[in-house]
Image (cartoon, rainbow, N blue to C red):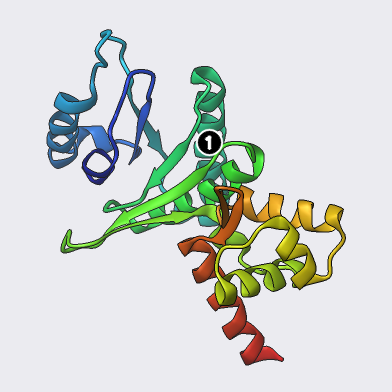
Amino acid sequence: RSLMLHNKLSEGDLVLFVVPRGGTKNERTREALRTIENVVRYSTTGRDFYEVLELDVPEKENPLGSFYKSLSRLSRTIIEKIKEINASEIIFDISGGMRILTVIGLLSAYIVSSRVPKRPVRIEIETEDKVMHVSIPTRVFNVILSSREMLVLRILEERGPMSAKDLKEETKMSRTTLYYTLRDLMKENLVENVQRKYRITETGKAILYLNVELERAFF
């Protein structure tokens, strides 16, 4: 439900619903899937882009083993689907559902983002009262900035949008070093280039704030 409310589905999209093994036999789950199916079952061309994946819930006898098995299956399935439909973006919506599947989904998002680095992967979640919806880039799994990244973000936060020439003068970096630093920051959506000037994004501000606080706490 949350995924469809906050993202416009279009032709070529694939919606993969993850439920616990045997979950489709549960009347509540079936009813939820039927409701969702009315919205996402077919694209304008009639191609089916709605699938259900049943995962084994960790067993008492071997909880860790079955946990990794489900994590592996989910990640492998998603990567295969990405290649199959040539997905340009991957969204993990973890609103609602079993907590253990939520954890599996979070870890799978990290695995997928590391295996398909050229495609943006983000996590979305809706609060229980449905008042707030948050979209989180998978950069949250790797929040520690390098000293060069910290320097660039701090300058952009303090001074505002700057040209590459001005940034080079402020950071005292070589042109090549600055180029690769900006490239990495833009890849993670921490910095954006608007009209030939670089500026820090809201995500960049959040990641910078977190790093500053960590620096204060541990150093």
Can residue 62 be seen in the rendering of this structure? no
Q: What residue do we see at 64% from left, 41% from top?
A: 117
Secondary structure type for disc 1: helix
Residue 36 appears left or right of 110? left
| Residue 118 in the image, given as x and y percentages of width and height | 63, 37
| Residue 44 in the image, given as x and y percentages of width and height | 24, 12
Q: What residue do we see at 71% from left, 56% from top?
A: 164
| Residue 142 in the image, given as x and y percentages of width and height | 63, 61
Q: What residue do we see at 61% from left, 66% from top?
A: 143
Residue 9 appears left or right of 71? left
Instruction: Name the residue type under label 1.
Output: Arg
Can residue 200 be seen in the rendering of this structure? yes
Q: Which residue is mark 1?
A: 73
Give the camera-side residue of 167 and 66: 167
The quadrant holding residue 175 is bottom right
Category of crowding for the residue at label 1, using alpha-carbon neighbours closer than 10 angstroms: few (below 14), some (14–19), many (at least 20): some
**Outermost residue, top side:** 45
* Above or below 179: residue 128: below
* Above or below 130: residue 42: above
| Residue 135 in the image, given as x and y percentages of width and height | 38, 54
Give the camera-side residue of 218 and 67: 218
Residue 30 appears left or right of 92? left
Q: Quadrant of the N terminus?
A: top left
* Above or below 59: residue 208: below
Q: Quadrant of the C terminus?
A: bottom right
Total numbered circles:
1
